[in-house]
Image (tube, coloured by chain):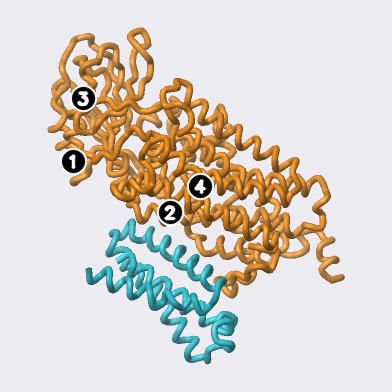
Chain colours: A orange, B cyan
Amino acid sequence: MSIAADQARRPAAERGLRPAMAELHTWGGLLFGWLLFAIFVTGTVSYFRDEISLWMRPEIGQLTATTPEVAADAALRQLGEDSVGVRRWMIDLPTDRTPVTSVLVLRDPKTGPAAMRLTLDPASGAPIKVRNTAGGDFLYYFHFDLYMPQRFGRYLTCTAAIVMLVAFVSGVITHRRIFKDFFTFRPRKGQRSWLDAHNTLGVMALPFHVMITYTGLITLLPLYLPWGIEAMYPDGRQKFVVEMFDDAPPRKPLNVAAPLAPIAPLLAIASAEWQGGTVGRLVIDNPGDQAATIRLVRQDSERISHAVQSMLFDGSNGALISKTPVIGAAAEARGIFHGLHLARFSDIWLRWMFFISGVVGCAMIATGLVLWAVKRRRNAATVGHKIVDALNVTAITGLPIAIAAYFLCNRLVSAASPGRTVWEVGCFFAVWLIAGLHAAIRPQRAAWREQLWLAATLFAAAPFVNAVTTGRGLPRSLMNGDWVFGGFDLTALATAALFAMSAVYYARHGEAAA
Amino acid sequence: MIALAFALTYTGWAALCFAMPSHARSLRGRPFIQPIVVMLRCIGTIALLVALPVTAQAWGWPNGTTAWFGILTIACLGLIILLAANPKVALLPLVGLPAAAIIVLLR
């Protein structure tokens, strides 16, 4: 005891590597833990971004995707009826995951709305009237943007990712029994259990954790390491962006009307170029003009690499203008890292594995945060400890509550209401804020208990509110094999069960639960 | 193929786990003798490694390698949860998973 106390009094540098690393891990992890938890949760949920977006637009029925040729042709016929003043059509063709054609129309503001989103039936091209919603995209962008202006959020996520990498290295060094305790989890032993859980959750998915954090940093590479780009592109970033995304600025319109060349032969040329790959996106500039161009972009779910492959055609005669050059090894490596992070290449099984690994990551961060508080419980009356306790509750249960509220709000705000996107996002932040206030004013145990039960209730409510408001309830989904709706509802129920179980455990054992 | 990969990784982790004295003690009250420990370690390592070509068979090498890490994690998570509940229960999937794999493969 006296030796330990003596050890603790000496500066970290004199105590050796392990205690120094432990200190770094403890305090770095605590300071960034809440932010990292939010990033991990929204990132994990974003593996199902497309499915969430479909669930949040129930007007899109259970459709089957058509071939790219049929969908592209139908979409262009529909859009061609209204091409006056259009600068660009960006057409995302249907996929196995999203069976509709999604279009962004950019227009000269003098002739109509500057930007308009359309959802089209893949087979007929007829517009489907869907509710306004940010859908899964909101959670996806929050994951790295944190809904902050001026790229501030992105710098913050980058910093958090670097701290996370530091926490992995220092954590592995601190964990002196990494092999001996590989499978060790001793429940109902208080602090011991939280440490066991934190360790095993960290170690069992360590390859995923390190991969996802490192590749996450890679996705924002041009943001925080701009100097290489500045040295290579002294004339400005524009040229770098053009090369990186193979997206040249559009040609000047000639103001001579000319119909678009038939699309099917161009799709065939692109497919042959990509050894049977398919076109995922059409970008058409100046449609209806003689200077029109058609850019075909390869589907990003076919390869691990996220590096763009595209072909640019003349819109009026269908002649090939250019195609993405073969990229160097470093650019391809970046593409693979970015692709691994997004996991768009995954089939449904692999996607679930990524999701579960993500949940393990969330749980690792949460157990780490709780461990900090449990370990210092005898200081519970101090202001600092109370702040940590409140922030723990706000992050670990408050965020899931806010996400559940976001889903519920999608069903409860009128589908026709014009400002409903603002309502949904506002609801998310308002509920999270209220959860934070609740955690701050309630005694710690009551705050945990009440928020765990609230999270369970809200997630359990989602499938029921969905059934009542859309007529696409769980029994019907399961009978029709509608795995988007069925999967969402079942996942919501499973999440609710998890929170309810945690609440029961917590009521019975307190912090000794785990 | 996916079921087989899960069966192999779970078996591999379980073998490595029960090769350790503390986990063997929780299962049967005493550790295994040294030759059995060595054998369990060999079985465990081989089972985990053999799961890699199995996932490659199901997904192709690039995606299969990614999936292998995912399956390793999930099998390990399952084992740890069952171990914490009851070490004897953790043995059940050793029978159930290969049986499921055989059924899926024969179908």
Q: Amino acid at mark 2?
A: Phe
Q: Where does the image place residue A397, in percent across and percent down from the top left?
A: 61, 47
Secondary structure of the residue carrying numbered label 2: helix
Q: Is residue A298 above or below residue A112?
A: below
Say which mark, if any, is on residue A354: 2
A346 lies left or right of A501 = left
Q: Where does the image place residue A68, in percent across and percent down from the top left?
A: 20, 37
Are the residues under marks 2 and 1 on the same chain? Answer: yes
Q: Are marks 4 and 3 in contact (CB under 8 Å)?
A: no
Q: Quadrant of the N terminus of chain A?
A: bottom right
Say which mark, if any, is on residue A271: 1
Query: How many other residues sit within 10 Å of disc 3, few (<14), some (14-19) or many (≥20)?
Result: some
Reading the chain from its start, which is encountered first: label 2 or label 4? 2
Are the residues under marks 4 and 1 on the same chain? Answer: yes
Q: Whole-Å distance between the Cαs marked 2 and 4?
A: 24 Å
Q: Is residue B75 above or below residue A229?
A: below
Q: Where does the image place residue A288, in percent across and percent down from the top left?
A: 21, 16
Q: Are marks 2 and 4 in contact (CB under 8 Å)?
A: no
Q: Of A393 and B32, which appears nearest the observer?
A: A393
Query: How many other residues sit within 10 Å of disc 2, few (<14), some (14-19) or many (≥20)?
Result: many
Q: According to the image, label 3 marks what residue?
A: A76
Query: On what subunit does the disc labeled 3 rest?
Result: A
Reading the chain from its start, which is encountered first: label 1 or label 3? 3
Q: Amino acid at mark 3?
A: Leu
